[in-house]
Amino acid sequence: MSPRMREYFRRKLETWRQDILCETDATLEKLRHETGHEADLADRAAVESERSVQLRTRDRARKLISKIDAALQRIEDGSYGYCEETAEPISLRRLEARPIATLSLEAQERHERHERTHRDG
């Protein structure tokens, strides 16, 4: 991968990371300002359900940030864009669609088939 492409993906990942952090901050601010003192039992249940969804979304965002950080580290150490299983280059189309990818499309498909086979068996 050329230095120009590495820089492109570094910027893409950093922007994605910043967007997630801004969304997370907004969610936390919203949760802080919600009182949770709804008089109606149905309203209280709806608020609790919404809060649960927001917390799950925040947990997914935390995990995604971890993957983004790992991808940024791979850019720094020169291993970004190479399959962890085969050491072959990951296609630019795949990286464009999923910049945190660690497996080539073929390796990912093998991995998913293996999971399905062992999960169903």
Image (cartoon, rainbow, N blue to C red):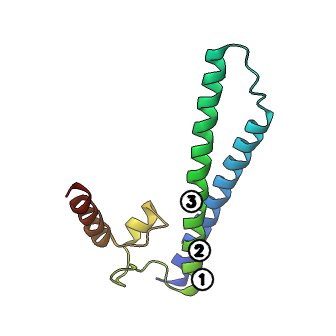
Residue 102, image x, y percentages = 43, 72
Mark 2–mark 1 Cα distance, whole angstroms, equals 6 Å
Image spot of residue 42 (x, y percent): 61, 16
Label 1 environment density (alpha carbons within 10 Å; few <14, some 14–19, many ≥20): few
Marks 2 and 1 close (CB-CB < 8 Å): yes
- Count the marks: how many? 3
Q: In the image, residue 5 lies at what x, y percent?
A: 51, 76
Q: In this view, does 16 lie to the left or right of 22?
A: left
Residue positioned 40% across, 71% down in the render: 92
Residue where numbered disc 3 is placed: 63
Is the residue under label 3 in contact with that under label 2 (CB below 8 Å)?
Answer: no
- Write down the residue under mark 2: 72
Between 28 and 100, the one nearer to me in the picture: 28
**Residue under the point 22% across and 55% down:** 120
C-alpha span from label 2 to label 3: 14 Å
Q: From what the image shows, is residue 75 above or below residue 113?
A: below
- Give the residue type that dot 2 points to: Leu
Q: What percent of the width, then of the height, locates residue 24?
A: 68, 49
Q: Name the residue under label 1.
A: 76
Q: Which mark is residue 105?
A: none
Q: Is mark 1 on a helix, strand or loop?
A: helix
Front residue of 74 and 29: 29
Closer-to-camera residue (37/1): 37
Distance, label 3 to label 1, CA atoms, is: 20 Å
Ranked by sequence position, the earlier of labels 2 and 3 is: 3
Mark 3 Cα-neighbour bin, 10 Å: few <14, some 14–19, many ≥20:
few
Amino acid type at image mark 3: Lys
Going by the numbered disc 1, the residue's amino acid type is Glu
Q: Eyeballing the image, is 12 above or below 81?
A: above
- Element type at marker 2? helix
Secondary structure, mark 3, is helix
Q: Name the N-terminal-most of marks 3 and 1.
A: 3
